[in-house]
Image (cartoon, rainbow, N blue to C red):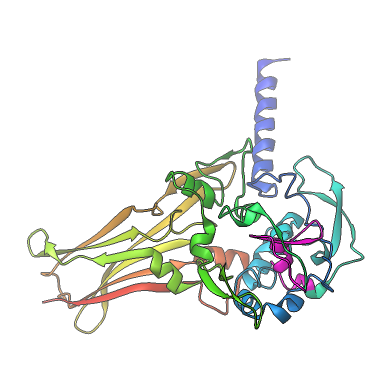
């Protein structure tokens, strides 16, 4: 075989390989044995079902809190539904958003592929559409092997509760869905794709999700019961403006002399409230820092916008490009310098910080028609210039 034919053959193989890399279903994680199927669930003694509606008949305060959470809307969330369809409606995504076996229309019998992304499915005779709409419902965390589990052993007239150490280590319950691993040959990331846990580990601190996302409370566990130490079932995060604001210290410095007739302003953002990076989770999350300069007629004459985000190259290989998010106790500063001698003269400077759940280009690409804002303001200040 001639050298020319060998070169052409290798070139063709390379082209076919690259085509496959740009057209294949995009996945960045491994499907572990614990995560490959939804959770089988048996109704515990003393209960008629594993529905949150039944739990809420007695645990009214907890159920009321749960209903306000992203967990309760994990299946119904319109962004998730659009994103799921855009990404090919992979069954494995349901194992977090509708984690119980009876929440899924099909049973997973096995897999056609070693990556476990192409499951062998069969109709589920016990599928419960109402339970599916509950998303991450009570039983996902509190039912195991046909028993109700929690942070301590409790004997009640309604049902017994068995102590499970996952409820006392601060993160055990959270790990199944919030610790996605990506140790694949084609993934070259410094942190796992949604690296909440790894981001806390880099601080050297103990991982304790409950500390922030489930604040302590003393109250009756059931209506009319005795007060007990427990936790609120709120799980606030990036969708909650006040929660995000509480995690950031933002300071706009007094002006300092610039060059010539210039002025310089500096804004400092410090992650004081969360031990993982801010923002965290899906790489769609970002912070936007914007300086804007206006004249006396309130016309924009200059602006500077910067993003704090994690940017990943997804194809042909998955690689971190840069990461400007804020680590715990880290401060990032951004400056804006301008001349007062310009025409028209500057009259007003605004400094603004927004939290973004989704970049606009991503929203347009997947066809998500949002009814609620995907960005919200967490800081704003105006300075009249003289």
Q: Is residue 141 covered in magenta? A: yes
Where is residue 241 shown, x and y percent of the image? 45, 73
Residue at image position (65%, 32%) is 14
Residue 21 shown left or right of residue 39 in the figure: left
Q: Nearer the viewer, residue 9 or 325?
A: 325
Image quarter (top left, top right, bottom left or bottom right) of the C terminus:
bottom left
Residue 2 seen from this side: yes
Q: Which residues are magenta?
A: 131-157
Where is residue 356 shown, x and y percent of the image? 46, 67
Residue at image position (66%, 78%) is 222
Where is residue 243 shown, x and y percent of the image? 45, 70
Q: Is residue 42 above or below residue 323?
A: below
Where is residue 136 shown, x and y percent of the image? 69, 66
Residue at image position (70%, 49%) is 25
Residue 318 shown left or right of residue 86 in the figure: left
Q: Is residue 263 above or below residue 205?
A: below
Q: Nearer the viewer, residue 169 or 174?
A: 169
Q: Is residue 244 covered in magenta? A: no
Residue 304 seen from this side: no
Residue at image position (63%, 35%) is 185
């Amino acid at each position: 075989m001639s050298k020319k034919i060998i070169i052409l053959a290798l070139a063709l193989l390379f082209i076919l390989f690259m085509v496959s890399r740009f057209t294949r279903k995009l996945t960045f994680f491994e499907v572990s044995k614990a995560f490959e199927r939804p959770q089988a669930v048996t109704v515990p003694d003393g209960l008629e079902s594993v529905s949150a509606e039944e739990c809420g008949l007695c645990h009214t305060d907890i159920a009321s809190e749960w209903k306000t959470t992203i967990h309760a809307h994990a299946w119904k969330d319109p962004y998730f539904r659009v994103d799921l369809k855009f990404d090919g409606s992979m069954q494995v995504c349901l194992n977090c958003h509708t984690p119980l076996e009876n929440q899924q229309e099909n049973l997973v019998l096995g897999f056609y592929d070693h990556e476990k992304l192409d499951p062998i499915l069969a109709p589920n005779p016990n599928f419960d559409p109402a339970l599916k709409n509950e998303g991450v419902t009570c039983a996902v965390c509190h039912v195991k092997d046909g028993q109700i589990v929690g942070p301590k052993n409790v004997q009640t007239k309604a049902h017994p509760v068995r102590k499970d150490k996952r409820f006392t280590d601060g993160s055990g319950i959270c790990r199944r869905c919030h610790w996605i691993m990506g140790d694949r040959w084609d993934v070259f990331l410094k942190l796992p794709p949604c690296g909440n846990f790894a981001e806390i580990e880099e601080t050297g601190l103990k991982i304790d999700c409950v500390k922030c996302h489930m604040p302590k409370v003393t109250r009756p566990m059931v209506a009319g019961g005795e007060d007990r130490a427990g936790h609120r079932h709120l799980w606030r995060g990036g969708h909650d403006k006040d929660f995000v604001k509480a995690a950031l210290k933002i300071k706009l410095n007094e002006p300092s002399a610039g060059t010539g007739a210039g002025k310089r302003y500096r804004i400092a953002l410090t992650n004081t409230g969360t031990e993982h990076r801010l923002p965290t989770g899906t790489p769609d999350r970002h912070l936007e820092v914007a300086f804007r300069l206006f004249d006396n007629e309130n016309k924009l004459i200059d602006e500077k916008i910067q993003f704090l985000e994690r940017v990943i190259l997804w194809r042909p290989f998955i690689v971190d490009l840069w990461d400007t998010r804020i680590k715990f106790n880290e401060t990032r500063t951004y400056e804006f310098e301008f001349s007062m001698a310009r025409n028209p003269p500057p009259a007003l400077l605004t400094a603004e910080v927004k939290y973004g759940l989704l970049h606009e280009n991503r929203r347009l690409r997947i066809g998500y028609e949002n009814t609620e804002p995907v960005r919200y303001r967490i800081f704003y200040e105006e300075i009249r210039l003289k």
